[in-house]
Amino acid sequence: MPLLRRRSAVFSALLASLLTLPLLPVASPAQADAPCTRVGRADVPGAQHQVAACLDDLTTAGTVASGHTDAADWAGLHSAATRNPGGVPGVQIDGYFPDTSTANPTHGWNHDSQFVIRLPKRWNGGLVVAGAPGNRRQYANDFTISDWVLAKGYAYASTDKGNVDLEFYRDGKRPGDAIVEWYHRMTQVTVAAKATVARHYGRSARRTYAMGISNGGQLVRWALENHPELYDGGVDSEGTLWPPDNGSNALVYLPVALRNYPKYAATGDPEAHAAMLRAGFAPGSEFLWDFNYRILWDGTQRRYREEIDPGFDGDLEAGIPYCQSGTPNCDTDYDYYARPRSVHQAVRRASMNGRIGKPLITVQGTLDTLLPIKVHGDAYASLVRSQGMAWRHRYYRIDGASHLDLEYDLFPDRMRPLLPCMRTAFETLERWTAPGGGHQPPPSATIPRQTSGDVANTCALS
């Protein structure tokens, strides 16, 4: 039996066994006016530790004040003008699965593989599962995804992916182990959340969707390729791509940017500019290069290189924020294609192949300057087509959006935020996967930049 099919069979059997467990006895509400009709015992299958709370509001409008989220986890992911719903009562379960790494300090637990599960009082029968973007923690999607789907009636679950923060690469024994763990944790929290939902509401979820931003979008792609039996579809927002062959990736284009941007910024050097464009950065994104150079590129290059190629021994541990080109072992001069075969094998372990087993909608901004759309979104859409799966995929290139919606706030006259398009994509996915065949979404397209109306909260994908 092929490996993928064997894994699917194993997880299908595990899920079936969890969903047939008896319902837990109902506990009395914590207080007379509590909004929860049944709190029950916090009993997420497989969790090593868990705590349940009955909350008047599961959205960030309430959880920031109650201490059931951390606003620092989702900083910069949405525009300051984003409007969010609130007032969703229900049960929140926080906890962690067994793990040997201890980088996540949330709740003072100092334990990785933390999760959050939210169970609204008024449930629509669905479940949305997400993984944290970047190296953030389990609350990173609270403002962008959780608030919005809870208000629609969905239960919600998210994982910290099993290793967090700036030195996530220290987790694991082999190069690539930390990233591979992300995939396991996404599957783990999905299976556990499905069982928890069935126990809490007395029936299984009718539909389950995967949803994620950046590295979270990467998890959505992997999940629909490797465990489509767990989901009805997914929304991948600006997901990271590690191609299975020797195609370009972050360790290819980021050193080019770190070498050439300073020359371009200082003198307008046309050769440096041309090198940036050849590496995959979009023409017209130049006004975003300085922000990304100062805030994002260097740390991203160094930390992912530490994960994929620790033998290169760059300068991260020495505390040098920007080494000079030409310095021995400087990440600025990193040449992925010249590195040993073991480095390329580590990338293949983390890679995707495009063979999605359920409907997937991808949205990415044309001005994405951390994960250039040519290298990530366009290349993944090509992989999907090469597998004959384009009929299950819609790809919307959002003109004028970049990687962080914070960038829209910096340049509102030149950009648009991506979050409203991700939310529209989710509603499109709901219609696409509706019982009875659903409604076919608009064809894949580049969506012109919206310049009027409520840009921070609306997006049309047709």
Image: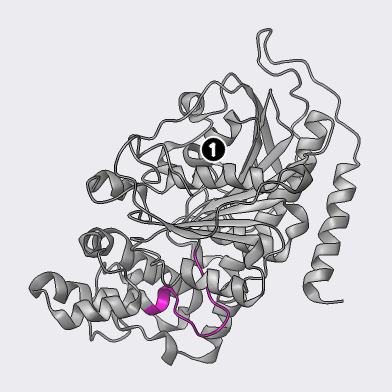
Reply yes or no: does residue 310 show up in magenta: no
Say what amino acid the circle numbered 1 marks.
His
Which image quarter holds the N terminus? bottom right
Depth check: give the residue in front, 352 or 185: 352
Depth check: give the residue in front, 153 or 318: 153
Q: What's drawn in magenta, residue-wise?
A: 240-252
The secondary structure that dominates the magenta segment is loop
Depth check: give the residue in front, 266 or 326: 266
Depth check: give the residue in front, 252 or 34: 252
Q: Position of residue 333 (x, y in %)?
A: 30, 83
Q: Quadrant of residue 330?
A: bottom left
Q: Is residue 264 left or right of residue 428?
A: left
Q: Which residue is mark 1?
A: 107
Q: Position of residue 367 (x, y in %)?
A: 33, 60
Q: Quadrant of residue 286?
A: bottom left
The residue at the far top in this view is 32
What secondary structure is found at the residue carrying circle 1? helix
* Residue located at (90% from left, 49% from top): 17
